[in-house]
Amino acid sequence: MTKINKKILVTGAAGFIGAALVKKLIKEGEVVIGVDNINNYYDTNLKRRRLLEIDNLEKTNSKNWFFYEFSIVDKDYLDEVFRKYEPDVVVHLAAQAGVRYSITNPSEYIQSNLVGFGNILEACKNNTVENFIYASSSSVYGGNMNLPYSEDQSVTHPISLYAATKKSNELMAHSYSHLFEIPSTGLRFFTVYGPWGRPDMAPMIFANSIINEEPISIFNYGDMLRDFTYIDDIVEGIFRCCYKPATSCENFDFLNPTPSKSFAKHRIFNIGNNKPVQLLEFVEAIETALCKKAIKEFKPMQMGDVKNTFANVDLLKDWVGFQPKTSIGEGVSLFIDWFNNIYRKI
């Protein structure tokens, strides 16, 4: 793979996936411009510690890492950063995350995931960005129960506002790709976990509760399948897409359109582990790594949640050679090592 040696703007740079990607890009010698509003959806100390980790990289200096703290909803600030740096590649990871939070705080999702996303698209259009990559989600599959999930399956039945905003992002990006020739790649993330993860996600909740001898909620009475994907595998997939802009499908069938490809320069890919496990198996892996048993409370399915996730990643493998390498046992061990030695001391 040949380095692009161009400027890469990463939104959500203080987030779980964003910070990990920034570190990868900096280590590879790329110039990175980071944007994040450091909101209080979860502990801001964790976000700032991620940024500190970036600042402490040996290769980091004033020439290849620039960070700005503001919201992508603020169009004026966003436009100013785009004008100043003229990024060649934009990786848009900033968003209001969380399925259940979207039920009680819908306005946060409308602003960040729709208005903010529109601002990013406008900035890409006005600055002739060569490659636009953005975060979608496995949540878009919604009520679909046909496993494994394939990019060519229907995603027209979202069961949460969060999922609806992510599907909307795919539609918005496609339209801008068609109208303004912006090569755009949407990546549907599947349950990312690992060091520096979000405290509102299951792995962190489970680990915290087990350590503190508090009950953990096992929804749908444990009958759930999740395609847990280790952070390093996710970052490698995004990284590879930075070097290969989306292209139009030369043989696109307008009478029988394929959802994952287009006559526009727009592609959709699943990015997951492709090896789902039962939720209770994942809990057992955490118990093993912590050498401590969980107190389990079995409960019915939560509103807005899906029973199973399972990513078919053949398209991304064919596109950039993506191949997840981290087993659940290895990934959980690395996660718990970070949890014990770093997170509990923050």
Image (spheres, grey):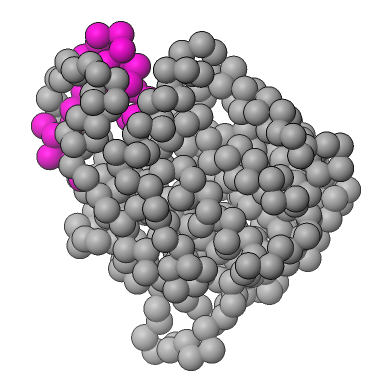
Give the tally of numbered discs. 0
> Nearest the camera: 2 or 6?
2
Q: Is residue 60 above or below residue 84?
A: above
> Image quadrant of residue 203?
top left
Bounds of the magenta segment: 201-225
Quarter of the rendering occupied by the C terminus:
top right
Q: Position of residue 345 (x, y in %)?
A: 51, 11
Find out whether residue 114 is within the magenta segment. Answer: no
Question: In this image, 75 relative to 315: left or right?
Answer: right
Q: Is residue 71 above or below residue 84?
A: above
> Nearest the camera: 250 or 234?
234
Find out whether residue 209 is within the magenta segment. Answer: yes
Question: In this image, 122 relative to 63: left or right?
Answer: left
> Nearest the camera: 167 or 223?
223
Q: Position of residue 260 (x, y in %)?
A: 43, 72
Question: In this image, 306 relative to 59: left or right?
Answer: left
Can residue 199 be seen from the camera position used here?
Answer: no
Q: Is residue 144 above or below residue 317?
A: above
Point 39% across, 53% down: residue = 325
Point 29% across, 20% down: residue = 290
Point 29% across, 38% down: residue = 329
Q: Position of residue 86 (x, y in %)?
A: 83, 55
Point 25% across, 49% down: residue = 276
Quarter of the rendering occupied by the N terminus:
bottom right
Q: Position of residue 142 (x, y in %)?
A: 29, 52
Can residue 196 be seen from the camera position used here?
Answer: yes
> Nearest the camera: 210 or 71?
210
> Image quadrant of residue 3?
bottom right
